[in-house]
Each structure stands twice: as C-alpha cells, then as structure tokens.
Amino acid sequence: FNWLWRADDRSWSYFVDWHNKLYKTSFTKRDFLSPDFNERFGISSDVLHRRVMGMYTAVGVRNLVPASGAVSGVRELSKIGKTLVVTSRPPQMQEDTHFWLKANFGMVINRGVHFTWNRHLDGNPKDLQTKLDVCLREKVSCLLEDDLNYAVPCAEKGVQVLLFDYYGDVSLGRNIHPVYSWSEAVAKIK
C-alpha cells in the first residue's frame, strides 16, 4: 500500500487563528475551505495569498506543530505500507517544509515529498503537479486529506480518501470517508 498524506494538515488551523487575531474576524477552518470563500467574504485570491504568506512569515513553517496524533499515526502507517507526503504549500516554502518534516517525522516518510498546485493561491507555476497527478503516478491507494476540493478528483479515480474534519452537508461519494482524528484515520486504514 502507498499512503499519501498532507504535510500541512494543521496549517489551516494556524492560519485561521492568526487571521482572526490580526484582522479581527471570526472565521473557522470550514469557512476557509469553502469553495466560494473569496466571494462570500469579499477577499480576492490575491489578498488571501498575501495573508497566507504573511502567516507563514510571522509563524514560520519550521515552528508549526504537527496535528495531535500525526507523528504516531504516520509512524504506524509506515509499518504497514509506503508513506509519501503531498503538500500544496507554496514553492518558496519547500526548504522549510523539508526541514519541518525531517524534524518531526524523521525517516518514516519513505516515498518522498511532493509539492503540488494550490487552488487557493494565484500565481501557481503552470507546471506544478496536482494531488491527483501524484496519486496516479505513485499508485496511491489511500489519501489522507482535509480539503474536499482535492479529495474529489482523487476519489473519482478510485483512490480511497480519508477526509479530515469535514463538516459539510453534501454527499461525499463512495471513496471519501470522513475522519476526525489521526487515531480514527489509522484505525480505518488498518
């Protein structure tokens, strides 16, 4: 088995907290993950990009703390299959992301790190791969994801998706399974 998981599964939580404090808003992660976020809240994708980059600069990628249970969960998964990372962090964050992964996960990532196109940011290089591209090329059987917009194309191509923290009201389809913790994700995979 190949397990593909997000390196930045907690970045949105950091961003939402940082954004709310700095801009005096009361958004939730669910608000930011909605497909019509820019229109609903009157923030252009360019402004959102600048704010995301501002958060990464202020907090520092190397200072992000992995989600609760992520380290032990990935270690457990690496015992039963191949693990690789996919992240839509901006290209300028690659060096810090590699440092963060090595510091927090060490050698349990045995199939590499893949940087992909980010649907939230304008100015993505046109040659960046998508999460679906990585899943198909690497023959990924299970994707751990927290954004429905990345999950759906993979599920439509037969990849089983464990979708973290999904609180939507639409049908997820047969290959998408909601999970609310790393321990639940690992248990479903086992």
Image (cartoon, grey):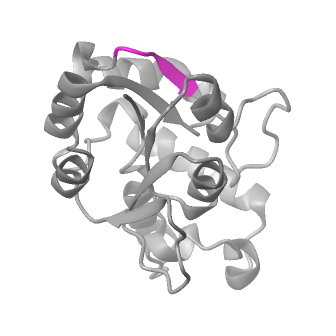
- Work out whether residue 108 or residue 64 is closer to the camera in this orientation and state it: 108
The quadrant holding residue 110 is top left
Instruction: Tell which of 78 and 126 is nearer to you.
Output: 78
Main SS, magenta region, reads loop
Q: Is residue 11 magenta?
A: no
Residue at the spot 20% in from the left edge and 44% down from the top edge: 190
Left or right of 85? Residue 36 is right
In percent of width and height, residue 87 lies at 52, 36
Q: Nearer the viewer, residue 80 or 28?
A: 80
Q: Is residue 100 above or below residue 36?
A: above
The residue drawn where x is 82% and y is 26% is: 127
Is there any visible trace of residue 44 in the rendered image? yes
Say whether residue 112 is magenta: yes
Q: Position of residue 118 (x, y in %)?
A: 67, 45
* Residue 60 in which image quadrant: top left
Q: Which residues are magenta?
A: 110-114
In the rendered image, the residue lying farthest to the right is: 126
Q: Left or right of 44: which side holds 103?
A: left
Residue 35: x %, y % from top left: 68, 71
User: At 50% from the left edge and 32% from the top edge, which residue is drawn?
Assistant: 140
The vertical placement of 105 against 190, above or below, is above
Q: Note whether residue 104 is visible.
A: no
**Tally of marks:** 0
Q: Quadrant of the N terminus?
A: top left
